[in-house]
Amino acid sequence: MDALLSLIHGFGVLADPMNIVYMCVGVVLGVLIGVLPGLGGANGIAILLPLTFSMSPTAAIIMLSSIYWGALFGGAITSVLFNIPGEPWSVATTFDGHPMAQQGKADQALTAAFTSSFIGALLAVAVITFLAPVVAGFALRFGPAEFFAVQLLTFCSFVGMGRESPFKVLAAMMLGFALAAVGMDSVTGQLRMTFGTVELMRGFDFLIAVIGLFGIGEILLTMEEGLSFRGKSTKITLRSVMNTWVRLPRFWITYLRSAAVGCWLGITPGGATPASFMSYGLAQRFSKNRAGFGKGEIEGVVAPETAAHAAGTSALLPMLTLGIPGSPTAAVMLGGLLIWGLQPGPMLFIEQKDFVWGLIASMYLSNVVGFLIVLTTVPLWASILRIPFSIIAPIIIVLCCIGAYTVHNAFLDVVIMLFFGVVGYVFKKLHYPLAPLVLALVLGDMAESSFRQSMLLSQGNISIFWSNWLVGSICALAMVMLFWPLIAFFIDKARNGKLGTHGETGRV
Amino acid sequence: MAPEHDVMPEAVPGEDQSTVTTRVMELVVAAVLMVLAGVVMLDSVRVGIGWAFDGPEAGYFPFYIGLIMFLASAVTFGVNLIGRNADTSNFVERSALRLVIKVLVPTVVYAGVMYFLGIYVASAIYICFFMMWLGKYSIRKAAPVAIVIPLILFWLFEIAFLIPLPKGPLEAAFGY
Amino acid sequence: MKLARTLATALTTVAIFGFAAAGPALAEWKPSKTIEFIVPAGTGGGADQMARMIQGIIQKHGLADQSMVVINKSGGAGAEGFMDVKESDGNEHKIIITLSNLFTTPLATGVPFSWKDLTPVAMLALDNFVLWVNADSPYKTAQDYVGAIKAGADNQFKMGGTGSKQEDQIVTVALEQVTGKKFTYVPFKGGGDVAKQLVGGHIDSSVNNPIEQVSFWQAGNTRALCVFAAERMETQGAAKWGDVPTCKEAGVDTEYQMLRGIFTSPGVSQEAVDYYVALFQKVRETPEWKDFMAKGAFSQSFMSGDEFKAWVANAETQHKDLMTKAGFLAE
């Protein structure tokens, strides 16, 4: 009840019309930032941070967080339309979102993505509103061993899904890990696989690889079939939005599961990218339409988007209550708080009630605003698919190059990105799966450093991974996920034994 | 039994001549991956692949990553080298390859030009070239797109967001 | 054919404009285009925060004649950023903010650069390091903790820090030299992570900067044992920094402070350096800057010219000495 009263107070803070204006401007800017690959939420906010100095802290944080929500929404757009993830956390959205667009269902994919983002955000804001003190304590329990367990779980819930040759899956995954290892070793500070070049010390950035592998690779594949998009453009009407909405409620379990995964990883903080992968993997494990995943299954859009937005939203909770950013974007906002003279941390909720509850109230409102804005733009985005390929393709490639450059302000990254484009094309043709590669690339670094941090803490004793109930149960869960196909097989067998042949007729 | 001839899934008759077979491509990619894996392992040995008293050394994981990658690619290599059902169909039809090259080569040139002229001028040239060469648009249609898009990008990045992108002599002339 | 002509025209245009670019020389130097402000660290870290803060202050108060853009070049522990400035010889529109990786990165990685390759502009502030323990630990003072370390075994105590072979680990090494015992040093990605690990009880102590721990400290989660500086910090309102003894007072004779300074490209004119010194002096006058300094309990010493050069040279020797003893030098 206390939280509810504070929240109402928060909405009161928002009543200033200028705040609403800032909110709308923020969301639009955010969508733009999300659409432009490489120019992520963190960069976008860092760039706009100094512009907000002359505003009041509340107005400034409302605008910045609105940019953040906008970027979360916007990341899905290019993933669906062009197979280019605008943000790292929308990589998993490409798996089914882009096939849907190719089948002429871009409108459905976008509607599902935006709606899922919205629902994920709402569930996460509800968690922030009512559970903030409880959940903040939970985040502190996560040491290196727990982080490693979470990364293991992400991995185990995602692997073993492909129809590709297991040796190719392994090779692709290991290539991802190997690329992740290039650069400076975070534990000893030694240089690995840089061969004396300063350029390689920066390592292979996930986004650069992904823009190349997915974006450029896709354009090259498209070219094979001549100068046309594989996506058929459809007429977008309010009806198609409604039709999509009608289909969504049946995925309520996916929504809840993905939002739970998202909140968990946002708060601990594991990040929105692992959350989206884990949630996609789980959705596929437990879906009735397993076989449809990767070919344009709407549930494969719902799961990662819900999780990513839930994680992105809940990442602000540890920032506010503990002063620890849950994501790179939150880290930049944290800097903003300090600059405006606010000290994030346990005292913020007590000393700056107006600010905190104003921000939380704005999360509700700006997500609604953001949702409405992006939803009305669905026809606009989908109509991009009607632009002739020979006009849109060079523009996409230009945007990919800019995106690759802006990640590290390095020209070589543009070249690397194009190289990854060729690799993506060849791999796709030879049925090397790209998903394990990018997952390994994004998780490899984190997983290795948390493993080695754990080993330092335990002095090389591996039992640290089952030393308490928390880390032990996450590890156990990871093992269950890894062997799930086997377990499912036995469950199925047991059930079939009892029910005769009904198991097979169950899925129609 | 000649397995080479019964696996031709989408062989389109007519002008399309063969380029390389999928099998050759498989061998090449597997070999490249094996070489890469070798490099990874070698470099890992340099930084130490042991298990120190306080956990693995810097090269411990990369070494085994390299090893697994080597073995997995070796299997792929072997299967395609001696396998009976290796895919000997065309990796890419010549006409398709020509289209792919038509995009790839200008793009590589574009990246090179970008280094000297900056991203905006290079993009204008690239978009214009692409539209005229591949899209068969007239210069009157291509030029406006090719000029307006970089201008929008320039405004967006350099002026609105204050993100400096690579610039060349033209921008310098205007004081940027 | 037509296309070739178009291309040729375009290239000629570019060339003509290119040659027209040379501007007239001015007696009093003023920036003629956007100033690039390089941060040799990632977004969200301490150096990045300070750089964006400065950018905002300059913009808000209209202190510079041109706008300023912050560019992160964090690759290879900041080597990328430093190399970039080193290689832009004579570029007067490029400045860089430093953290201790100005000294540590070339020593630890062997990447060829040093502060002598850049032009020193000014010292903005010195960042303090404080020895922290969890409030639940039995150590009330630095003596208690050091006593326990001396009595304990090597590697028994776990020190968390940011990065490897960088400032936090150097402070740890300095502490090891005083106690004669080894720490288990666990590197994390950022100061915030380290602070959280300490509060969560996953590590025994940390040497976080004041700003990274202040909120936990005030909430009673952690305890400040001593500051690695020659003088005590100043109390700022509720944050009683003045009550934290220096490590020397507490019997641990170690000092370490991190430079937050500004450098520019090599080979720039003295007029340009003077311009930047004056600019940063103006920045220091603003209330926002003063507030930021107070929040982070920075030591506010401003230096420029030869005084600053001497300080940097001395700091380099100190780093080299500590890193050699710790065996952190690149072979």
Image (tube, helix red, strand yellow):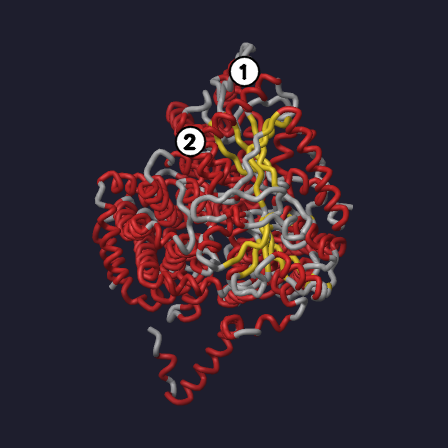
Residue that appears at 39% across and 34% down: A51
Question: What chain letter is assigned to the residue under label 1?
Answer: C
Callout 2 amino acid? Leu
Q: Quadrant of the N terminus of chain B?
A: bottom right
x, y percent for residue C261: 58, 33
Camera-near label (2 vs 1) is 1
Asked if labels 1 and 2 touch by Cβ distance under 8 angstroms, the answer is: no
* Dot label at residue A470: none
Horizontal side of residue A446 vs A234, given as left or right: right
Neighbor class of circle 1 (other Cα within 10 Å; few <14, some 14-19, many 20+) is: some
**Helix, strand, or loop for circle 2?**
helix
- Decide if residue B88 is in sight here: no
**Helix, strand, or loop for circle 1?**
loop
Q: Quadrant of residue A304?
A: bottom left
Viewer-nearest residue: C29 or A44: C29
Callout 1 amino acid? Trp
x, y percent for residue C98: 59, 36
* Dot label at residue C29: 1
Total residue callouts? 2
x, y percent for residue B9: 51, 58
